[in-house]
Amino acid sequence: MASNSDTIPKNPVLDICQDYLALRRKGIEYIEKSGSRWWTDYNSHDPGITILEALCYAITDLGYRTGWNISDILATPEPCPDDSKNQAFFTAREILTVSPLTLNDYRRILIDMDNVSNAWLLPRQSSCETGFHADCRNGRLC
């Protein structure tokens, strides 16, 4: 009878960082040693044990992910003709929820330029609006 190598073993040998039950057991041991006089409930419904279980899960998840090959992490599934989309990580513009500069910051940058006496900036209401408008009088921006 031939052995099939495509099976999942019943009792895999795991690193300690990937073994959830071992981490939970070790965490409860630490809790029993340090807080045995005050902490008497070690069941899952206890808020402290719930926090310990969440921490154990996070450690096992990180342990699993750090075991990946870096080329697999950085590779894109299919190359895209647009080179800006061939990166594995999001850009700051894509992930930041707010603009790091306000309209007043941009206004100050414009006013500090030579030959600019004042500037007003308004956000675009639609994509059909023109991007910029300069009011020039006598060869000077107004």
Image (spheres, rainbow, N blue to C red):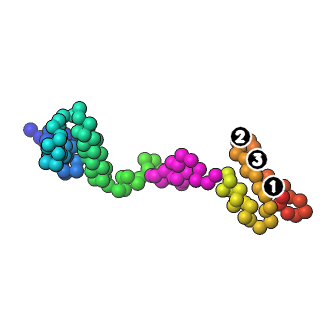
Mark found first going from the N terminus, 2 or 3: 2
- In the rendered structure, the answer to whether residue 123 lies left or right of residue 25 reads right
Amino acid type of the residue that numbered disc 1 sits on in the rendered structure: Ala
- Looking at the image, which is closer to me, 2 or 62? 62
Residue found 77% across the figure and 67% down from its top: 114
Left or right of residue 49, residue 79 in this image: right
Q: Which residue is mark 1?
A: 134
- Rendered location of residue 103, percent (x, y): 67, 51
Q: Give yes or no for contact between labels 1 and 3 (Cβ–Cβ under 8 Å).
A: no
Q: Main structural element of the magenta stretch: helix, strand or loop?
A: loop
Q: What residue is shown at x 22% (from left), y 50% (from top)?
A: 17
Q: Residue furthest bottom?
A: 114
Residue 130 got which mark? 3
Q: CA distance from mark 1 to mark 3?
A: 11 Å
Residue type at mark 3? Thr
Residue under label 2, please give it: 125
The crowd level at tag 2 (other Cα within 10 Å; few <14, some 14-19, many 20+) is few
Q: Secondary structure at mark 1?
A: loop
Q: Quadrant of the N terminus?
A: top left
The residue lying at 49 percent from left, 50 percent from top is: 90
Mark in the foreground, 2 or 3? 2
Q: Nearer the viewer, residue 121 or 64?
A: 121
- Please report the bounds of the magenta region as a residue range: 80-102
Q: Position of residue 136 (x, y in %)?
A: 86, 58
**Would residue 44 be seen by someone viewing this image from the given angle?**
yes
- Hey, what amino acid is under mark 2? Gln
> Magenta span has 93?
yes
Q: Position of residue 16 (x, y in %)?
A: 19, 50
